[in-house]
Image (spheres, coloured by chain):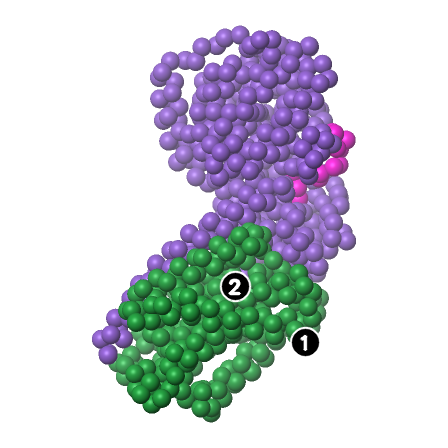
Chain colours: A purple, B green
Amino acid sequence: MKLAFRKTYLSSLAVMALLLTVLMAACGDNTATTTSAATAAATTASSAATTAAANGSTTTAAASGSAAAASSLGPIPKGPAQINGTIVVALNTEITGAGSQTGELARKAAEIAVDKINNTGGVNGQKIELKVEDAQSSNTGALAALNKAADDKAVAMVGPVKSTQILAINDRIKELKMPALIGGTNVTLTQKGNEWVFRFRPNDGIAGNAMANFLLNDKGASKIGILHDSDAFGTGGADVVEAAVKKAGKQVAKREKYTTGSQDFTAQLLSIKSAGADALVIYGTNAQDDAVILRQIKEQGMKIPVVGSPSFGQTIVTSLASDVTEGVYVVQDFFTGRTPEYNEYAKAWQTKFNSEPDGLSAWNWDAIHLLSRIIAQVGTDNSKIREALSQVKGYQGAVGLFDFTRGGDGLNSVDVAQYKDKKLVFIRNVAVS
Amino acid sequence: MEEIIQLLVSGLAYGSIYALVALGFVLIYNAVGVVNFAQGEFVMVPSYIAVVFLNFWGLPFILAYLGTILVACLFGLLFQQVAYYPLRHRTYLPVIISTIGASIFLQNAALVVFGAEPKKPESIFRPGDTFEISGIFIVPQYVLILVVTLLLVAFQYYLFERTKLGKQLQATAQDKTTAQLMGIQVNHMIIFTFMYSAVLGAVAGILVSPLLLVSKTMGGGLALKAFSATIIGGFGSVPGAILGGLFLGIAEKMAARYISSAYEQAFAFIILIVVLLIKPEGLFGEKISEKA
C-alpha cells in the first residue's frame, strides 16, 4: 500500500510535468490563433513581425547562406522589364502557412491598387501586372519569392511585411538590385546599408518616442511610469520610451513588466502608483492583456493619463473593456479614415470585396501607387526607380505623408487617438525627428 | 501599509480561487487515487456556460449562476462516465492519460464553439464600483470571492464531518474495498465526488472570470497553480489545499511587488521547488508514510 501510494504520487508528478509541456504548447498555439484572428485591427502584425524579428540575427545568417547558394547558380539574367507590354510588379507575401491571413489581406490591398491604376489609363498607357509570390510564411520562402520575382522580371517588389523575412532576404535584394517596398517595422531594417529598401510603415522606434513626447509635451507629465510586456516587442518599445523620457531631461518614476497572458497586474500597478507616476505608458503586445490592465487601472482608482501601444486600438479591447477605455490614449500607425486617400482605399476595397477594409494592409496600396507614379516618370529601369524613390518628398498616401529623402524610412510620425464614448477619436499626429 | 493590505486582499482573492481548484484536485485524488489533469477544464467549461447564460441568453445573475452549477454537476457526471468509469479497473496510468485527453478535447471544443477571442462575462460589479477605505482600494469582486469561498469551505466541512454522506465519502477515500463491504455504494460516492469537484470548479470559474476573461486556456494556468498549491499545502490534504492556495496567492503578489514583477508567474513554481526541497510532505501536510 505504502509503495503503491508513493508510486502513484511520483508518477502523477511526472505526468504533471508532461502536462505542463502540453499546456505550454497549447498556450503558444492560442497566442498564434488570436494574433492571426486579429489581423484586421492594425498593429497586431507589427508586433508579430517584431517579435519574429527577435530571431532575426540567427535567421539572417541561415538565409544569407541560402542566398549565397542561390546566387552561386549564376546571376539571374536581367531582361527587359516588360512582357507583352505589361509592367510586372511583384508582391512578396504569405499566401500559405501561418501568415496566410495577413498575406491574403495584403494581396487584396495590392489588387485594388493595380485595378485602380489599370482602370484609369495604366502607366503611360501600359497595364501593371501583379505577380503574387508566395513567401510561404518562412524566411526561405520569402527568399524563394524574391528569386521568383526576379525570374518574372518584376521591376520592383512590394513586401514582405515580416521583419524577420526582410532581414533574411536583405543581401539578396542588394544583389538583385530589386527595389523593395517593405512593410516590416523593426527599426534596424533600414539601417543595414541597403539603399534598395524603402519602408512604407512607421518603424517601432517612432511609436515609443511619440508616446513619451505626447505625455511630456501635451500632458505636462514629468514622472512617467512604464508598464510593459516582457517579450521582445514590449521590452524594445519600453526601452525606446525610457530613452526618450531621459533624453527630454525627465524621469521614469518606475518601470514594471509582466508576462504575456498574466491575469493580475495589481502588484505592478501598485508599484507604479506608489512611485508617484503622473502619467503611464503601457507597451503591451497582446490585446487581451491590454483589456485586463485597463480594467485594473480603473479598479485601483488610478486617474493619471494613460497612453497605450498600438495593440490598445484593437477591436478586442473595445469588445472586452469598453467600460474602462474612456480617456485612454492610443498610438497608431495612422488613424484610419483621417485622409481622403485612405477613404479612397477603403471605398475601393468595399466595392471589390464587400467587406471591412484592412487598415494594416493599406501601405501596399500606397507602395503600388507611388511606384506607378515613379515608373510613369522615369520608366522601368531599376536603378532609375530606386533613384526616384529616394527623392520622394511630400507624397500623401493613405497611411501618411511620405518623405524618403531622410533615408529608407518614408514615415516619421504616428497618430495619437483617444477613446471617447467607446470609440477612438483622432487627437493629433506626433512626428519624431 | 495601505499597499500591503491591498496586496493581501488581492492575494487572498486569487489564493481563494487556487484553493477551490486545488480542493477539486484533492477530492478526486483521494477518491480514485488519480490526479485529474482536466481540472482546469472543470473551471473553463462552466465559465463558458456562464457566458452563454449571462451574455447570450441574458438571464439574471442568480439564475445564470445556479444554472451554471447545475450544468457543472451534469458535466462532472458525464466526465466521470466517459473519462474515468470505463477505466476504473485499470491502473492509474490509463486514467491519467484519459484525463489529459479529455483536457485537450475540451480546450479544442471550446475553440471550435466559441472561437479564439476571449469572452467577457457580464458581472455583478462594474470596474467603477471599487470602494476606497483610507487609501486602500477594495475591488468588490475580491470581497465576493473571499466570502463565497469561506461559505463553501464551511459548507464542505459540514458535509464531510457532520453528514452520513460525508462519512461515506471519507470511507470511500480511505479504503474502497472495506467501504464496499460496509455497504457503501462506492461507485455512487465516486460519481458524487466528480460532480462536487466540478461544482468547485464552476464556483471558481464564476468568481474569477469577471477578472480574467473566459478563454480556452484560462483553466490551464489556474490548474497548474492549484496543483502547486496542493503540493505546497501537503498533497492529499484538504486543509493543506486550502491553506496552500491562500499562501500561494499572497506569496505571489508580495514577490511580484517586492522582488520582481517580471517573474510573477514563475514564483509559484519557485516556491513549489523550495517547499519540496525543505519540507517534501508540504507545509501543512502529514508525512506520506503516515498517511499510507
Residue A51 is labelled as none
Q: Position of residue B275 (x, y in %)?
A: 35, 72
Q: Quadrant of residue B190?
A: bottom left
- Check disc 1 and give the amino acid type: Ile
Residue B162 lies left or right of residue A66; in this view the side is: right
Vertical comparison of A21 with B1: above or below? above
Q: Are marks 1 and 2 on the same chain?
A: yes
Subunit under mark 1: B
The residue under label 2 is which amino acid type?
Met
Q: Decide: few, some or many residues near mark 1? Use Cα within 10 Å; few <14, some 14-19, many ≥20.
A: few
Residue A84 in the image: state x and y as whole percent: 58, 8
Instruction: Point out residue A31 in the picture as x, y percentages from the top left corner.
Output: 51, 49
| Residue B109 rendering spot, x and y as whole percentages | 50, 56
The residue identified by callout 1 is: B133
Q: Nearer the viewer, mark 1 or mark 2?
A: 2
Determine the residue positioned at 42% across, 54% down: A24
Q: Quadrant of the N terminus of chain B?
A: bottom right
Q: Is residue A154 left or right of residue B248?
A: right
- Chain on which label 2 sits: B
Q: Residue at x 67, y 54 (%)?
A: A319
Identify the residue at image location x=68%, y=68%.
B59
Residue B274 at least partly seen: no
| Residue B135 occupies quadrant | bottom right
Distance from disc 1 to disc 2, alpha carbons, whole Å, reads: 34 Å
Residue B189 belongs to the span the image colors magenta: no
Which residues, given as a range, are shown in magenta? A331-346
Does A63 sit left or right of B262 as displayed? Answer: left
Q: Is residue B136 above or below residue A116?
A: below
Disc 2: which residue: B44
Instruction: Choose the circle earlier in sequence order: 1 or 2.
Output: 2
- In the depicted structure, whether residue A18 falls above or below residue A4: above
